[in-house]
Image (tube, helix red, strand yellow):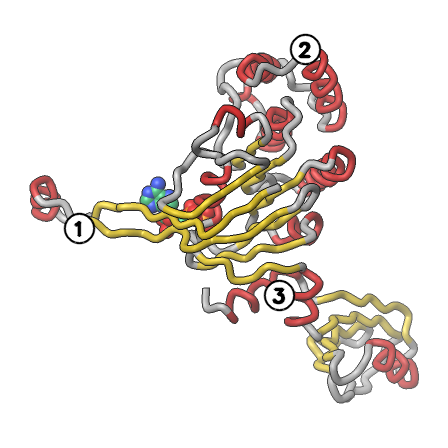
């Protein structure tokens, strides 16, 4: 469905020095730096996949998404999306894609949301029946009813994001590019947006490319991760493989009747210890969680146990460290 091969894109950026003298000099003699935003980026994505495109700030994520959505032209390399070259066949290409840039709006700021939707209907030439069906479904699932007649500038961030997502799906695209779709949203809105993304992927088989710094988005949604760093693809695989690679640790919290016995088990690090509660980190390469619990049961009157994996953020930090990005 998506084939990206050897994409490169660089930007020419004017050098600026501080001070009046330097500013005047630059009027007559401009110097430039070349920023290689992406270098030889290649990957393929199949129909129905949800791919998390991650990497630190300035890694080249937005540049790739902009090329794939036809906004930017690469210096070299190829990109074929459903048979179209995005920057050469923009009209046909945009019919197949929906794009949400969390930090920018595709809606008209001063008009009611529904009027923006009507404009998009005309721009994309959406058949009336398809538009009506999609609109009904989106209003219902994204709960837009309370604010669909309000101008976009009066909406809260969460309300606006729900409208942005609806706007990107009115023309039934087969691919959805989401760039930071949950940025700034409260916990309830984040969960609602994630649930909706999962639903359209499952029910309509929409392929989703998700760019985010929020690793819980990745954990909740992405089957596959593409990691980009300094413009190059560094990892292509799934999150559970990363977990196995970087995290042998499990965190357990035990609650017990008052005790002052110390915990001394090989492979177990005590992260915190109180009279009735201890938090332990277990290296599962040395000892299993069940072995630790059975050993503790012998010396403690345990009332509760919770077991957690290492937070996904910490795994990603280890991944970034390994690739020095
Ligand atoms: N229009 C532009 N002009 C000059 N340089 C640019 C332009 N767009 C991007 N860059 C540079 O290209 C590099 C990659 O930027 P890009 O926006 O693709 O990164 P990103 O991974 O999306 O980062 P972030 O997570 O911060 O949004 C950065 O060094 C950035 O400064």
SS for dot 3: helix
Estimate the spatial distance between the alpha carbons at disc 2 and disc 3, rounded to whole Å: 47 Å
Would residue 150 be seen by someone viewing this image from the given angle?
A: no
Would you call the spot at circle 3 few (<14 residues within 10 Å), some (14-19), or many (20 or more)?
A: some
**Residue at image coords 50%, 19%:** 108
Q: Percent x, y for residue 73?
A: 39, 38
Residue named by callout 3: 315
**Pointer 1 and pointer 2: residues touching (CB < 8 Å)?**
no
Residue named by callout 2: 128
Would you call the spot at circle 1 few (<14 residues within 10 Å), some (14-19), or many (20 or more)?
A: few
Estimate the spatial distance between the alpha carbons at disc 1 and disc 2, rounded to whole Å: 55 Å
**Residue at image coords 58%, 24%:** 155
Residue named by callout 1: 17
SS for dot 1: loop
Residue at the far front: name it: 83
Residue 82 relative to residue 40: left or right = right
Total number of numbered discs in the rendering: 3
Marks 2 and 3: which is nearer the front?
A: 2
Residue 232 relative to residue 146: left or right = left
Marks 1 and 2: which is nearer the front?
A: 2
Relative to the observer, which residue lies in front, 55 or 312? 55
Point out the tag, 1 or 3, that comes first from the N-terminus. Answer: 1
**Looking at the rendering, in which quadrant would you find the C terminus?**
bottom left
**Pointer 1 and pointer 3: residues touching (CB < 8 Å)?**
no
Residue 214 relative to residue 13: left or right = right
């Amino acid at each position: 469905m998506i084939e990206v091969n050897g994409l490169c894109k660089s930007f020419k950026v004017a050098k600026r020095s501080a001070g009046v003298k330097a500013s005047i000099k630059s009027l007559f003699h401009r110097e430039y730096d070349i920023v290689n935003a992406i270098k030889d980026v290649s990957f393929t994505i199949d129909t129905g996949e949800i791919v998390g495109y991650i990497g630190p700030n300035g890694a080249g994520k937005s540049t790739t998404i902009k090329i794939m959505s036809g906004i930017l032209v690469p210096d070299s390399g190829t990109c074929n999306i459903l048979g179209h070259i995005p920057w050469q066949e923009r009209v046909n290409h945009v019919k197949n894609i929906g794009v949400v840039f969390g930090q920018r709006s595709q809606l008209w700021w001063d008009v009611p949301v529904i009027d923006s939707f009507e404009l998009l209907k005309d721009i994309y030439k959406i058949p009336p029946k398809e538009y009506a069906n999609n609109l009904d479904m989106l209003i219902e699932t994204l709960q837009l009813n309370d604010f669909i007649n309000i101008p976009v500038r009066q909406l809260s961030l969460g309300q606006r994001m729900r409208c942005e997502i609806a706007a990107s799906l009115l023309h039934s695209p087969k691919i959805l590019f989401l760039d930071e779709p949950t940025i700034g949203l409260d916990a309830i809105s984040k969960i609602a947006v994630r649930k909706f993304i999962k639903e359209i992927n499952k029910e309509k088989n929409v392929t989703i490319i998700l760019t985010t710094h929020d690793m819980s988005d990745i954990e909740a949604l992405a089957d596959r991760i593409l990691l980009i760093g300094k413009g190059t693809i560094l990892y292509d695989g799934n999150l559970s493989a990363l977990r196995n690679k970087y995290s042998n640790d499990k965190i357990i919290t035990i609650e017990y009747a008052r005790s002052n016995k110390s915990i001394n088990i090989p492979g177990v690090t005590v992260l915190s210890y109180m009279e009735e509660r201890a938090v332990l980190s277990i290296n599962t390469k040395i000892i299993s969680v069940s072995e630790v619990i059975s050993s503790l049961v012998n010396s403690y009157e345990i009332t509760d146990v919770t077991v957690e994996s290492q937070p996904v953020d910490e795994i990603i930090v280890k991944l970034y460290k390994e690739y020095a990005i």
